[in-house]
Image (tube, grey):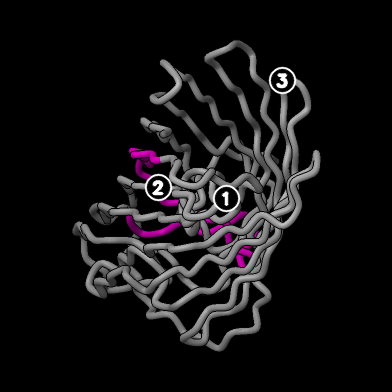
């Protein structure tokens, strides 16, 4: 059964799949986006160990502001920055208390990501290699179990290939993420396809898979396991929608949402909405 949901790693690697694109910025040019993501209260989680999923004793919600930027330092080399700030909330008890968690709010940085993207092939199809470093810049509050990011350094090498075809484009990507602090290794793969419906409007769909190899020995705190924020062995396969509207050659609006989940583990079930304003130069 397909269920509306949001993977709370929106997330691990940001609300936009822009970071997995095979296209690089020209030298001196760039792209920047400021996004606001709202995740309404939820208390149900995908869980491989529990048939039908898990229900928590509290409802959780999340608001994220995110800055994403790309800048071309050479003709085929682009630097990438992804900086989220998160406001997480744990509500009052709704079920019989099992763990001594508390209601409360945690506002802090998530995992800041820095990356470099290098074009390898530019001959009709684009082939690009990328290395992303996800920094352990999040915070954890044990009283509420809230965590704004993984307590680890992640290195994610990735390859991306794609191209444009008339008024449409498509690209696919794949890579393996290595985390410190006894977290499991992950692999990330997926694709995005877009269509230029008019001169100013783009519609895109994306499919993204994040899978844990379950080879880590990390033991998350019990309160963190209850909240489900950024625990070990999270995984999902999801389908989403993105819409872009360009006011002119430099400024536009974006909208994105995760539509349905086909699988998941240790991630929340909840609808999501992300709205952003972007600029190109």
Q: Position of residue 76 (x, y in %)?
A: 60, 52
Do the numbered discs 2 and 1 sit on residues whose CB atoms are within 8 Å?
Answer: no
Residue at 54% x, 74% y: name it.
155
Q: Nearer the viewer, residue 208 or 22?
A: 22
Tell me how far mark 2 sits from mark 3, CA to CA: 25 Å
Residue at which label 1 appears: 75
Query: Residue 166 appears in which quarter of the rendering?
Result: top right
Q: Position of residue 85 (x, y in %)?
A: 28, 54
Secondary structure under tag 3 reads loop
In the rendered view of the protein, which quadrant contains the C terminus?
Answer: top left
Position of 253 compared to 187: left or right? left
Residue at which label 2 appears: 68
Q: Nearer the viewer, residue 26 or 233?
A: 26
- Specify which label sits upstream in the sequence, 2 or 1: 2
Q: Position of residue 137 (x, y in %)?
A: 32, 70
Q: Residues within 10 Å of mark 3 (few under 14, many from 20)?
A: few
Q: Which residues are magenta?
A: 32-58
Position of 34 compared to 204: left or right? left
Tell me how far mark 1 sits from mark 3, CA to CA: 25 Å
Magenta segment main secondary structure? strand
Q: Is residue 194 above or below residue 38?
A: above
Tell me how far mark 2 sits from mark 1, CA to CA: 20 Å
- Specify which label sits upstream in the sequence, 1 or 3: 1
- Specify which label sits upstream in the sequence, 2 or 3: 2
Closer mark to the observer between disc 2 and disc 1: 1
Q: Is residue 97 above or below residue 213?
A: above
Q: How many marks?
A: 3
Secondary structure under tag 1 reads loop
Residue at which label 3 appears: 167
Q: Nearer the viewer, residue 69 or 146?
A: 69
Q: Residues within 10 Å of mark 2 (few under 14, many from 20)?
A: many
Secondary structure under tag 2 reads strand
């Amino acid at each position: 059964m397909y269920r509306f949901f949001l993977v709370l790693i929106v997330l691990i690697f940001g609300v936009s799949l822009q970071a997995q694109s095979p296209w690089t910025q020209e030298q001196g040019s760039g792209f920047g986006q400021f996004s606001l993501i709202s995740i309404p209260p939820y208390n149900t989680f995908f869980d491989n160990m529990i048939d039908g999923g898990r229900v928590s004793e509290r409802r959780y919600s999340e608001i994220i502001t995110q800055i994403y930027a790309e800048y071309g330092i050479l003709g085929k080399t682009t630097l990438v920055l992804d900086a989220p700030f998160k406001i997480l909330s744990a509500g009052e008890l709704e079920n019989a208390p099992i763990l001594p968690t508390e209601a409360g709010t945690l506002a802090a940085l998530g995992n800041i990501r820095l990356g470099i993207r290098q074009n390898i092939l530019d001959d009709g199809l684009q082939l690009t290699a990328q290395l992303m470093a996800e920094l352990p810049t999040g915070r954890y509050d044990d009283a509420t179990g809230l965590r704004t990011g993984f307590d680890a350094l992640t290195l994610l090498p990735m390859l991306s290939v794609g191209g444009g075809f008339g008024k449409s484009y498509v690209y696919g990507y794949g890579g393996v993420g290595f985390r410190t602090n006894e977290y499991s290794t992950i692999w990330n793969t997926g694709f995005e396809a877009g269509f230029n419906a008019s001169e100013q409007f783009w519609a895109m769909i994306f499919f993204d898979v994040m899978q844990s190899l379950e080879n880590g020995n990390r033991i998350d705190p019990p309160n963190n396991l209850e909240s489900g924020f950024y625990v070990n062995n999270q995984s999902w396969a999801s389908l989403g929608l993105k819409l872009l509207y360009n006011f002119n050659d430099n400024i536009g609006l974006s909208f994105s949402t995760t539509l349905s989940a086909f699988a998941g583990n240790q991630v929340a079930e909840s609808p999501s909405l992300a709205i952003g304003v972007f600029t190109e130069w």
